[in-house]
């Protein structure tokens, strides 16, 4: 899902000018020479509003899916979700062994006295 979202956004960036140019030509073909207007706005404006609504809908839907994934019981129970607490756990375990954690994920050194 995380890999698909940039591709979908890139698809929107490619598709947006194509849709707008197509709607501009369609509006001019339906009602020459000024184009087709609906409620005071031409087809290009309606197409842009529709594409923006689809983009916000896509981002909202993907956000819900990511939120559901991050709150899944299996993921919350996995050690990967506790990566932010790893430095504290390493320091605590090193202290019980009489060692000192250097702040990096490298070797431990003896505690200074």
Image (cartoon, rainbow, N blue to C red):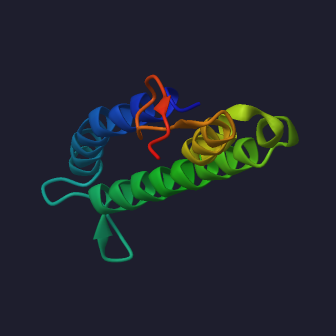
Q: Is residue 47 left or right of residue 92?
A: left
Question: What residue sits 59% from the left and 48% below the top?
Answer: 88
Residue 73, image x and y in percent?
A: 87, 42
Q: Residue furthest left?
A: 33
Q: Is residue 50 left or right of residue 25?
A: right
Asked if residue 11 is positioned above or below residue 87 in the image, the reply reads above
Q: Residue furthest front?
A: 113
Instruction: Classify the position of the N terminus by image quarter.
Output: top right
Question: What residue sits 18% from the left and 53% below the top?
Answer: 32
Residue 49, image x and y in percent?
A: 39, 61
Q: Is residue 58 left or right of residue 19?
A: right
Q: Is residue 101 left or right of residue 31?
A: right
Most foreground residue, 100 or 64: 100
Question: What residue sits 26% from the left and 46% below the top?
Answer: 20
Most foreground residue, 45 or 65: 65
- Numbered-mark total: 0
Q: Residue furthest right?
A: 73
Most foreground residue, 8 or 52: 8
Q: For residue 6, which quarter of the picture?
A: top left
Residue 80, image x and y in percent?
A: 67, 33
Q: Residue furthest bottom?
A: 40
Most foreground residue, 66 or 12: 66
Question: What residue sits 21% from the left and 49% below the top?
Answer: 28
């Amino acid at each position: 899902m995380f890999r698909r979202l940039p591709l979908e956004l890139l698809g929107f960036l490619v598709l947006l000018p194509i849709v707008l140019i197509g709607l501009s030509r369609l509006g001019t073909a339906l009602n020459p020479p000024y184009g087709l207007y609906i409620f005071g706005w031409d087809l290009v404006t309606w197409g842009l509003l529709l594409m923006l609504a689809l983009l916000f809908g896509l981002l909202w839907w993907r956000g819900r899916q990511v939120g559901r994934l991050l709150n899944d019981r299996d993921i919350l129970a996995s050690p990967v979700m506790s990566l932010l607490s790893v430095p504290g756990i390493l320091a605590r375990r090193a202290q019980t062994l009489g060692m000192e954690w250097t702040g990096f994920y490298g070797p431990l050194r003896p505690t200074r006295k």
